Image (tube, rainbow, N blue to C red):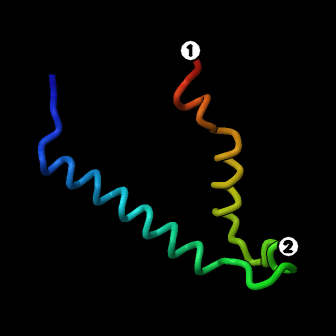
Amino acid sequence: MNHFTAEDTFIIVGIVIAYILFTTWLTFRIRSKNSGDFMEGSRAMPAFIVGILLMSEYIGAKSTIGTA
């Protein structure tokens, strides 16, 4: 049976930390400044972000983890 080595664990943790930092940066970059921006999505959200959000609606935890 394969086991993770310390190097593998550091790589995985590094990827997770990089993902968290990227999403935090992205959140602060395109956040809403007031309630009007919040309701309209600032009208500046790039198409690829909208696409990712739509995909996340269709691919949920039930379909990726499964139900027993």
Q: Which residue is mark 1?
A: 68
Q: Is residue 20 above or below residue 35?
A: above
Q: Secondary structure at mark 2?
A: helix
Q: Is residue 42 above or below residue 49?
A: below
Q: Characterize the local packing of mark 2: few (<14), some (14-19) or many (20 or more) Cα atoms within 10 angstroms.
A: few
Residue 57 falls in image quadrant: top right
Measured as percent of width and height from the top left, residue 41 is found at 79, 72
Q: Quadrant of the C terminus?
A: top right
Q: Residue furthest bottom?
A: 33
Q: Residue at x 21, y 48 (%)?
A: 9
Q: Residue at x 81, y 79 (%)?
A: 37
Q: Characterize the local packing of mark 1: few (<14), some (14-19) or many (20 or more) Cα atoms within 10 angstroms.
A: few
**In 3D space, how far apart are the residues under numbered discs 1 and 2 (Cα atoms)?**
39 Å
Q: Quadrant of the N terminus?
A: top left
Residue type at the position of mark 1: Ala
Residue type at the position of mark 2: Glu
Check residue 40 in the rendering and tell me which mark sits there, or answer none.
Answer: 2
Measured as percent of width and height from the top left, residue 54 is found at 71, 50
Horizontally, is 33 left or right of 65 in the view? Answer: right
Q: Residue at x 86, y 71 (%)?
A: 39
